[in-house]
Amino acid sequence: MTVRFVGAGPGAADLITVRGRDVIAASPVCLYAGSLVPEELLAHCPADARLVDTAKLTLDEILAEMLAAHEAGLDVARLHSGDPSVFSAVAEQMRRLDAAGIPYEVVPGVPAFAAAAASLKREFTVPGVGQTVVLTRTSARATPMPEHEDLATLGRSRATMVLHLAVNRIEQLVDELLPNYGADCPVAVVANASRADEIVLRATLSDIAERVRAAGIVRTAVVVVGQVLTASEFPDSHLYSAARCRD
């Protein structure tokens, strides 16, 4: 028996990986966050699979389901939105599975920031403009941020910044970013990336808060800040340069 943490992608059901789809199809137990994971993915489950929506369950209740499956010798597909490597809360589940001696694997998925970049038709690492991407969040109504990971500190490099779980406090976010990035810095907000109800806003730090409030966006959104969003005058990368030695 194995628990497999599967990245279910950013929202569109067809953005799951082939491996993730196959894991779902072969697992007699499927645990999924109903508020975030597209329901269409459950169609890949075996007809007699046990389906458990974990949206309202505690960590202990989720682990109890895994332990019960382990005792019955049943593989578990544990679906997480996006990719399990960031902001997925899999670390505490893995820790408890380690303690219980239950084997597990991880199947990567398409993260929300990648889906947002695709919707924006933008590369977040543009030659001569930005080669660093900071993935972070804010701490309001969530686990506190570690010391020295506040936006003022992270923003000193003026690197491209991608914020999850932050759009509901967009005014405070702007206040913390303005000193480093400036009022004219490009900003994009992508809500429900890759879904049919996706909303894309393009603005600057000076007016993004107003745009977000007018659009009624309060959750399930990625905020992207940085010059790469509008850069057009930049050098070609060395990767495809005629001057590059290819011997």
Image (cartoon, grey):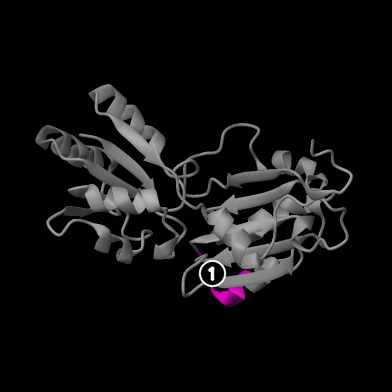
Which SS class for mark 1? Answer: loop
**Spot occupied by residue 224 in the image (x, y as percentages of width and height):** 66, 57
Q: Is residue 216 magenta?
A: yes
The image quadrant where one finds the N terminus is top left
Q: With 65 as the anchor, is 162 left or right in this view?
A: right
Residue 80 in view in this figure: no
- Residue at screen point 19% across, 38% down: 64
Around disc 1, counting alpha carbons within 10 Å, would you say few (fewer than 14), some (14 to 19), or many (20 or more)?
some
Mark 1 residue type:
Ile
Which of 234/95 is in front? Answer: 234
Question: Does 86 sit above or below residue 35?
Answer: above
Where residue 104 sits, quadrant-wise, is top left
Residue 186 in the image: state x and y as whole percent. 76, 62
Which of the 4 quarters of the picture holds residue 206?
bottom right
- Residue in view at x 15 percent, y 60 percent: 47
Q: Is residue 65 left or right of residue 35?
A: left
Q: Which residues are magenta?
A: 212-218
Q: Which residue is mark 1?
A: 217
The image shows residue 202, relative to residue 174, as above or below, that is below
User: Image point 79% across, 49% down: which residue?
Assistant: 240
